[in-house]
Image (tube, grey):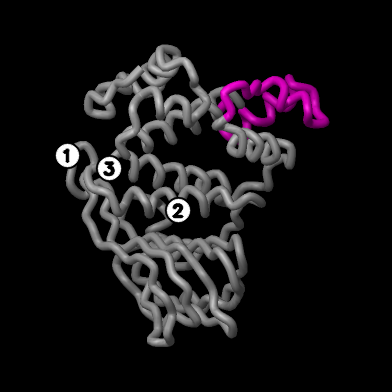
Amino acid sequence: MVPADNGGKLLYDGQKQVLIDGCPGMIVFDSIGHGFLRSSEMHQHDVAEISIYLSGSGVTWSGEQAIPFKKGTIVFYPPNVPHGEESKRGYTEYWILTKWRDPRSEMKSARVFQDTANGTLAKIASALIEEHQRENTPAITQDLFNIILSYLDRWEGRKPRHPLVDKLAEQLIKRMHEPDLEVGEVMKSLPMSIGHLREHFLQETGKTPMEFLTDLRITEAKRLLRRGFSVKAAGDQVGYVDPYYFSRIFFQTTGVRPSIYSGGKLAV
């Protein structure tokens, strides 16, 4: 992303090499940012870029492609492909420039996606930017970026998901913090039998609804623990009011106890 000199407000732009598990080069974030712009001059770089448009509308060019964008549009720009944007009234976006092993990086044209109705990828990108600004959080940053890639993988060249699968996923994301959330009750509220809905959900996400909810909660808990939350406080925030039960689920999911993951900040 190269903002034109047009008075656009750059909220954050960070350059940092992220080392995952001590292995340099697994993921390198060249630039992550969030800003309001009116245009972006044609430019190219040797890293891939993911743009998530948050407001406004306009046209982005990628090589010879002219791609209209609006709120919720997501564009993947391959490395070394010239691209730029233009908008009459301005637009807001998240951008992520990074190197990683991905077959899309070998492509010569942009890929276009659409965020979910409740802006799931925009929310994940917001959390990624927040973690990127912190020190010593590469594992969380990788987790969040991998979630974004998982969504793109699922959307790439595949027919739209069943609307009730999206509806169930949106409800689980929205209510993941509720301690008394019952997945079965949420499924009962939708016009499909629990068995068929569970089968569709598993086929289209690779996880059962309960596994999906658990992964959401543990990913958020890891982020909170790295921010300095105690084990009890992190568990409370993601719907696990019993710290011992939370510790057991966390260990089953990650192979590490939350007290160790957080650096010994166990407070129950």
For numbered disc 3, what is the local secondary structure? loop
Q: Does residue 180 belong to the magenta stretch?
A: yes
| 200 in the magenta segment | yes
Quarter of the image for the C terminus: give it. top left
* Residue 102 percent location from the top left of the image: 38, 50
Three-letter amino acid code at the position of disc 3: Thr
In this rendering, the label closer to the viewer, 1 or 3 = 3
Tell me whether circle 1 and circle 2 mark residues in contact (CB < 8 Å).
no
Residue 146: x %, y % from top left: 41, 43
Q: CA distance from mark 2 to mark 3?
A: 15 Å
Q: Which region is colored magenta?
A: 178-207
Q: Amino acid at mark 2?
A: Ser
Estimate how packed mark 3 is, as few (under 14), some (14 to 19) or many (20 or more) residues with alpha carbons within 10 Å: some
Check disc 3 and report the residue beneath it: 137
Circle 2 Cα neighbour tier, 10 Å, few/some/many (<14 / 14–19 / ≥20):
some
**Residue at image point 72% right, 26% down:** 187
Task: Name the disc covering residue 22, or none.
Answer: 1
